[in-house]
Amino acid sequence: QKEVEQDPGPLSVPEGAIVSLNCTYSNSAFQYFMWYRQYSRKGPELLMYTYSSGNKEDGRFTAQVDKSSKYISLFIRDSQPSDSATYLCAMSAMGGGSNYKLTFGKGTLLTVNP
Amino acid sequence: EPEVTQTPSHQVTQMGQEVILRCVPISNHLYFYWYRQILGQKVEFLVSFYNNEISEKSEIFDDQFSVERPDGSNFTLKIRSTKLEDSAMYFCASSPTGSLKNIQYFGAGTRLSVL
């Protein structure tokens, strides 16, 4: 079983739709959960992060973590064409010593059509 | 807004040549990382660096790779003898201290093409 699994899509939605992006993971040591947005041939841009379980909201974006199911989600409300990008989930453990490496999903390619 | 800066944006090299990829992390960050992304694949961890030493490295980070913080602002990745399979996007990341040290900010990347 892969450490982090993410449906690569592609996912195509009309403008204004609610988008749901998901990842599952197998490593129970993961405590920090991040969502990054990546445009083609660019670096990952941090969208949101969550520590442990629960929900976090930031504008049109909501991140959810269910550690009991090892499942995380990112919801985008009122999606816009500018949201079109690849969305990467990433996770890390608490870190022993000085290590906080991220383990990434493969990314979901999202297109929001005007 | 502070950002991680990487140079060059694109590096073309011949197989067997040495390359140095450069990064300027966010100024008050103390944890530094290199990742790579082969076209169409996941972003993969290479190495983490803290307090002037490597704290962890992946299986990919073999003897051909090295990292250095030559001064107070730069963080470099050196590949001694490049192979075709080293062609990828290389991302530098940094994170702050304290409760946010797990939160990493990435640069725009260097695209390395090995011919």
Image (cartoon, rainbow, N blue to C red):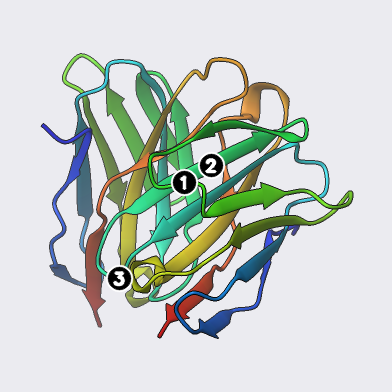
Pointers 3 and 2 in contact (C-beta within 8 Å): no
Kind of residue sitting beneath label 2: Val
Residue depicted at x 49% and y 75%: B111
Name the element at disc 3. loop
Residue B45 at x, y percent in the picture: 43, 45
* Label 3 to label 1: alpha-carbon separation: 18 Å
The residue beneath circle 3 is: B39
Name the side, left or right, on which B59 lies relative to A71. right
Q: Earlier in the sequence, mark 1 or mark 2?
A: 2
Q: Read off the chain for label 1.
A: B
Pointers 1 and 2 in contact (C-beta within 8 Å): yes
How many dots with numbers? 3
Q: Read off the chain for label 3.
A: B
Residue B62 at x, y percent in the picture: 46, 46
The quadrant in which residue A40 appears is bottom left
Q: Nearer the viewer, mark 3 or mark 1?
A: 1
Residue B48 at x, y percent in the picture: 58, 38
Residue B61's tag is 1
Q: Which quadrant is the N terminus of chain A positioned in?
A: top left
When the figure is inspected, residue A27 is found, relative to residue A40, above or below; the finding is above
The residue beneath circle 2 is: B47
Name the element at disc 1. loop
Name the side, left or right, on which B6 lies relative to A12. right
User: B22 or B4, which lies in front?
Assistant: B22
